[in-house]
Amino acid sequence: MTPTAPSTAPSTALYAALDGWIDQHFEQEVSFLQQLVRVPTDTPPGNNAPHAERTAELLAGFGLEAEKHPVPAQQVHDYGLESLTNLIVRRRYGAGGPVIALNAHGDVVPPGEGWSHDPYGGEVVDGKLYGRAAAVSKSDFASYTFALRALEAVAQAQGVALKGGVELLFTYDEEFGGELGPGWLLRQQLTQPDLLLAAGFSYQVVTAHNGCLQLEVTVHGQMAHAAIPDTGIDALQGAVQILNALYAQNQHYQGITSAVEGIKHPYLNVGRIEGGTNTNVVPGKVVLKLDRRMIPEENPVEVEAEIRRVIAEAAARQPGITVEIKRLLLAESWRQQEGSAALVAALQRHGEAVFGEPIPTSGTPLYTDVRLFGAAGIPAAIYGAGPRTVFESHAKRADEHLVLEDLRRATQVVARTLADLLTG
């Protein structure tokens, strides 16, 4: 195709060309995602550097050079992971436009049991691609990469002048809170974009999310032979007192509602319990790990203080029990920033055009790495390839999958949005 004279505004013809390029290269995009799914990134244990190496190799095949930024091994091990390399692909165009970062995470929880498809197979059945991280969020490694490729190919063919730049940020510790992924890149000043688009689903643009407090509660008693239990102090009975008090809080939380669409109220979950040494021994220690989701209106300092008070008061009702409380994670909530309006509007406009239905904005009860960019003053939105809900995707459950038509159309939405922001 012979390039035409340079243009500075997106047009219907440009959008059609972007859609067409993505259609023509869609089998290649699906193959790219399959290869990403086939390299495990279970976190824990978090040995994710090999996936970054494979991703960089595949990107190089598309002419996209990926900078490799390994996090120092001691930091990784202290964090509880095995290896971690973050990737940045930088593309710079003409002066005067924004730098837009597209961030997706490659780490994911282990597959667990109950799969009817190989969790690392990338198998396609009835228009769905199955595999751990197929939907969250290796799908957006694919959508963002191919949106960028489409934009550059079509802009060159049509003589469209791009301004600003794009960065692909592929990171690997979202499951552990993001501090060694986006957090590390931001602290090292390796990325300082003007706007951020982060991995999400296709039928809504997320502009706010919950925060999360995770605590480890160690309940100490005194071991004793089960034949003479009065000589010991049962840590499990103390833990039961604490659990009952914590779960009672959920009733209270239902009366604390959020004004953010898509977010209801705070809630608390105890996700792990360990303790005791044998059936014939009074348990001397029990460890609880809890997760407290915070709505955007809540103050994290106040939330943590309240939880600690509830635990201490419950423990005091069981004579001889002592408690240690360790904070594992404090992820603050995130709310829409003023500077994201043009990004959000473009995603909604093109989402409706491509999907044939309105694409609303909403909050999500999840917490994400986006909060780290928000804290750095970078306006952001969450949008990518996936279904209407996390539940539909089977993320963190058996048979996680992605509807391929959602991948195709989300890639088109992202490509069109980039065109708007980088040519306007």
Image (cartoon, rainbow, N blue to C red):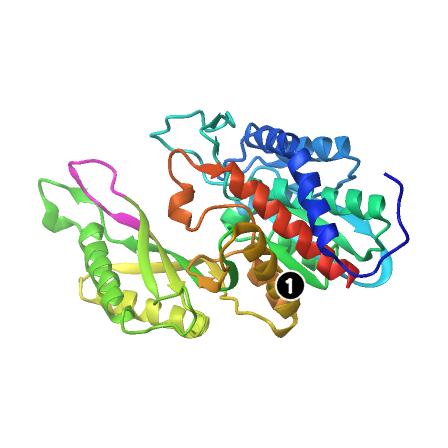
The image shows residue 146 at horizontal and vertical percentages of 68, 41
The image shows residue 363 at horizontal and vertical percentages of 46, 64
Residue range corresponding to the magenta coloring: 275-288
| Residue 397 higher or lower than 263, as above or below | above
Task: Name the quadrant of the N terminus.
Answer: top right
Residue in the foreground of this view, choosing between 70 and 337: 337
Report which residue position mark 1 lands on.
Answer: 343
Q: Residue at x 65, y 59 (%)?
A: 196
Determine whether, in the image, residue 293 is placed left or right of residue 251. Answer: right
- Callout 1: SS: helix
Amino acid type for the residue under numbered disc 1? Leu
**Residue 25, quarter of the rendered image:** top right
Report if residue 276 lies within the magenta region.
Answer: yes
Q: Residue at x 41, y 60 (%)?
A: 365
**Residue 36, quarter of the rendered image:** top right
- Farthest residue, direction front: 13
The image shows residue 403 at horizontal and vertical percentages of 48, 38
Residue in the foreground of this view, choosing between 270 and 90: 90
Task: Name the quadrant of the C terminus.
Answer: bottom right
